[in-house]
Image (cartoon, helix red, strand yellow):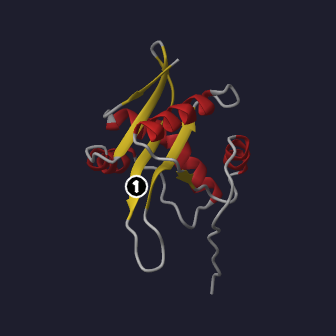
Amino acid sequence: MEVSITKDYGLIAILNKSVHELHVELYPNYFNEYDFDKVRSFLEGIIQKDNQLFLLLKNENETLGYAWIEIKEYEENVFKKGYKSVYVHQLNVLKPNRGLGSILMDKIYEIAREHEIELVELDYWAKNQVAERFYQKQGYVKYREFLYKRL
């Protein structure tokens, strides 16, 4: 198994399809249908930024998953202290329950340590129970909850 940083936005757009379609299935009122060309174009712009990293998980020539992370720096203000974090935007493996997600997370932790960052943050949609169980096993705890009320 190998995890490497990639700039191949076309491949990431392909790998994003199953994540995006899950979001559409769980929350059709919030997510647009997957459109490869639009996703690829969006990722082409994002992938060039220094603080955006895309990790590719491969075993020989077989692609097994990816993660999209961001190195974030929050400025101090009158209310909150400043801090840095590695924010996980997306993580997707093509073969679940084989430890592949953990391999990607280990690489994310390694990148955080290389940047001298002690905090990895992420969020997931409430109905995504697979993500909830995975991140609980990884040792993540809630420190903020996002609520809504439809009128």
* Residue 2 position within the rendered picture, expressed as x and y whole percent measured from the top left: 48, 20
Mark 1, secondary structure of its residue: strand
Give the mark count: 1
Q: What residue is drawn where x is 63% and y is 77%?
A: 148
- Please name the residue that numbered disc 1 is placed on: 72
**100 in relation to 76, above or below:** above
> Crowding near pointer 1: few (<14 within 10 Å), some, many (20+)?
some
Say left or right for 88 vs 40: right
Q: What residue is drawn where x is 56% and y is 32%?
A: 106
Q: What residue is drawn where x is 48% and y is 73%?
A: 80
Quadrant hosting residue 23: bottom right
Quadrant hosting residue 11: top left
* Residue 73 position within the rendered picture, expressed as x and y whole percent measured from the top left: 38, 58
**11 in relation to 118, above or below:** above
Q: In the depicted view, which residue is nearer to us: 96 or 73? A: 73
* Residue 117 position within the rendered picture, expressed as x and y whole percent measured from the top left: 46, 46
